[in-house]
Image: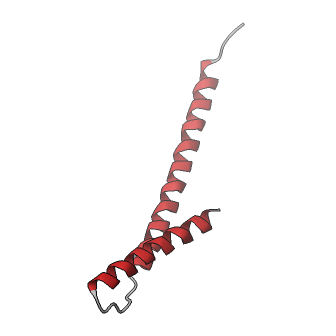
Amino acid sequence: MSINSSDGEDTSNHTDAYYEEVASQEEIYLEEREEEVRAILTLDEPSPTPNSRAQSLDEQRVEAAEELIARRF
């Protein structure tokens, strides 16, 4: 009974390549979502007072987070 070690190495190389590809796709996905969130958060909205401006930013963050969650599912 002989064991061919090159088969195991090929499988390992394919597995590593697969995981690297998945990680690369995840990174691209996260970068795109980050850009979308930044775009949402940098929208210019008139805010008369600093307190309402902070509240507006908080609301934008919540809305952006909800939108991302909705897109993911």
Q: Position of residue 67 (x, y in %)?
A: 56, 72
Depth check, front residue: 28 or 7 = 28
Q: Quadrant of the C terminus?
A: bottom right
Q: Residue at x 47, y 73 (%)?
A: 36
Depth check, front residue: 30 or 16 = 30
Q: Residue furthest top?
A: 1
Q: Residue at x 33, y 90 (%)?
A: 47
Q: Residue at x 47, y 71 (%)?
A: 62
Residue 38 occupies which quadrant of the picture? bottom left
Q: Position of residue 19 (x, y in %)?
A: 55, 43
Q: Position of residue 39 (x, y in %)?
A: 43, 78
The number of discs equals 0
In-image side of 29 versus 72 (left or right): left
Depth check, front residue: 70 or 33 = 70
Residue 42 occupies which quadrant of the picture? bottom left
Q: Residue furthest right?
A: 1
Depth check, front residue: 37 or 3 = 37
Q: Is residue 64 above or below residue 6?
A: below
Q: Residue at x 57, y 64 (%)?
A: 69
Q: Quadrant of the N terminus?
A: top right
Q: Position of residue 43 (x, y in %)?
A: 40, 84
In-image side of 38 versus 64 (left or right): left
Residue 6 occupies which quadrant of the picture? top right
The colour scheme is secondary structure
Q: Residue furthest left?
A: 50
Q: Is residue 15 above or below residue 47?
A: above
